[in-house]
């Protein structure tokens, strides 16, 4: 495997970075250290940069589409890594997965219909439902002994009681880091089939699953769901390409696909970012070694965080993730309510994290940390958090 320097610090300030340049605009102190939004502080793989350089050197950025080599690159990735071979006619390209979620909500439900989610969950799940005049139905995940699971009885009951038409599945689950097992996926599928519920599976973090917890593409684990399922994928998290805006959405059923495409047409959107298409193809063709090294580095970051909390901040507990590059931290041991915790993190620890309450599910005493940064950044953040907790303990006489 090639050597990659994930320890290298790259100054992202004054680059119009949402993560680094908009603290004040988002209500945080100007000097906070950000570990919130889900992008990486690592450069994209060199083959991607090389492909983009060639495209830039050509100098023309007109309307662009892709041909067979693009599909071969993307489909080949999923076949090699997940044992799943999608078909060319299934593919619909969109500028992002959240855009695809909104299109699916509009295509597969009517105003007033209920769409079910499983909080605490990625917060745009709420907005794409509410902003399209649908009802949010919630079947919260259960946290028992530091492990999140699905209450299948509650899931079925909520589907029946709310007359749910669509389930938005987060797989792997953001922010809690669950990688759903084949058994869990099949049970979800059985319930949805039994009540004629369609499924949109957001699998944008599929490339980040830890040893012992293999990710299963929903349509690979449950091919019988092909008539009711949309699978959303993208290279954006895996290869740090979010700003290039390209996602690959897989819809086997011709009727669902036609409805989805109709909503895209109604939105006025057509061709994708031409550089995003170039980057996506290069990443899936040549980015595997880089991603292997990146995953190894991220696991080491997680190991460092786990050990640091145990030794220096035992009041904060890590919910052990099975995948993603997030750490979901239980801060209830600090004795702060949701608002006080958010203020403590921003004003005392001088950190910008994602507050747990925005994910729903009664997670106000949790915080989400993005681990995709050089270890020196993570060490600095944890040091700031340690000193803030120590000061809080002295203040409270603990």
Image (spheres, helix red, strand yellow):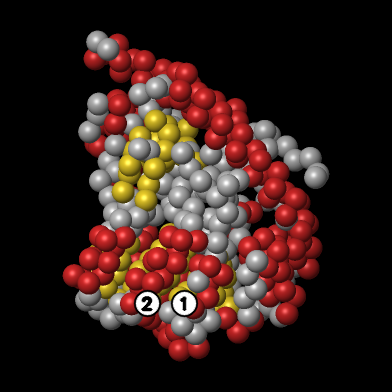
Q: Is mark 2 on a helix, strand or loop?
A: helix
Is 258 or 271 nearer to us in this picture?
A: 258
Residue at left 33%, top 42%?
144
Residue highlighted by disc 2: 193
| Residue 269 seen by the camera | no
Is 109 or 210 nearer to us in this picture?
A: 210
Residue highlighted by disc 1: 225
In this view, the residue farthest toward the front is 183
Quarter of the figure with residue 237: bottom right
> Looking at the figure, which quarter contains the C terminus?
top left
Is 199 or 94 nearer to us in this picture?
A: 199
Q: Do the residues labelled 1 and 2 touch (CB within 8 Å)?
A: yes
In this view, the residue farthest toward the left is 161
Distance between mark 1 and mark 2 Cα atoms: 8 Å
- Residue 132 pos. (x, y %): 30, 72
Nearer the N terminus, badge 1 or badge 2? 2
Residue at left 28%, top 81%?
110
| Left or right: where 391 falls relative to 226 | left
**Vertical side of 309 occupied by 147: above or below:** below
């Amino acid at each position: 495997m090639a050597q990659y320097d994930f320890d290298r610090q790259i100054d992202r300030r004054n680059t119009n970075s949402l993560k680094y340049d908009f603290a004040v605009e988002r209500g945080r102190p100007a000097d906070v250290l950000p570990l919130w939004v889900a992008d990486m502080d690592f450069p994209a793989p060199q083959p991607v940069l090389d492909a983009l350089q060639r495209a830039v050197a050509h100098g023309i950025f007109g309307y662009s589409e892709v041909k067979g080599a693009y599909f071969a690159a993307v489909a080949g990735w999923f076949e090699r890594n997940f044992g799943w071979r999608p078909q060319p006619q299934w593919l619909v390209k969109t500028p992002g997965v959240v855009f695809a979620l909104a299109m699916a909500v509009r295509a597969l439900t009517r105003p007033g219909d209920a769409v079910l989610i499983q909080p605490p969950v990625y917060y745009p799940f709420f907005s794409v439902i509410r902003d399209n005049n649908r009802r949010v139905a919630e079947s919260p995940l259960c946290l028992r002994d530091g492990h999140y699971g699905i209450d299948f009885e509650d899931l079925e009951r909520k589907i029946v009681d709310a007359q749910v038409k669509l389930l938005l599945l987060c797989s792997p689950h953001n922010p809690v880091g669950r990688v759903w097992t084949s058994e869990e996926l099949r049970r979800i599928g059985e319930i949805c089939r039994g009540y004629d519920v369609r499924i949109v599976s957001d699998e944008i973090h599929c490339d980040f699953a830890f040893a012992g917890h293999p990710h299963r593409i929903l349509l690979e684990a449950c091919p019988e769901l092909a008539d009711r399922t949309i699978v959303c994928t993208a290279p954006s998290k895996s290869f740090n390409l979010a700003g290039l805006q390209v996602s690959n959405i897989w819809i086997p059923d011709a009727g669902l696909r036609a409805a989805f495409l109709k909503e895209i047409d109604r939105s006025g959107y057509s061709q994708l970012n031409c550089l995003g298409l170039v980057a996506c193809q290069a990443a899936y063709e040549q980015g595997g070694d880089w991603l292997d090294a990146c995953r190894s580095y991220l696991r080491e970051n997680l190991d460092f965080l786990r050990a640091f909390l145990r030794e220096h901040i035992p009041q904060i507990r890590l919910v052990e993730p099975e995948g993603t590059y997030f750490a979901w931290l239980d801060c209830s041991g600090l004795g702060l309510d949701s608002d006080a915790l958010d203020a403590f993190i921003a004003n005392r620890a001088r950190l910008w994290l994602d507050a747990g309450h925005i994910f729903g599910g009664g997670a106000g005493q949790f915080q989400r940390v993005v681990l995709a940064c050089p270890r020196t950044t993570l060490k600095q953040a944890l040091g700031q958090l340690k000193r803030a907790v120590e000061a809080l303990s002295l203040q409270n006489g603990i």
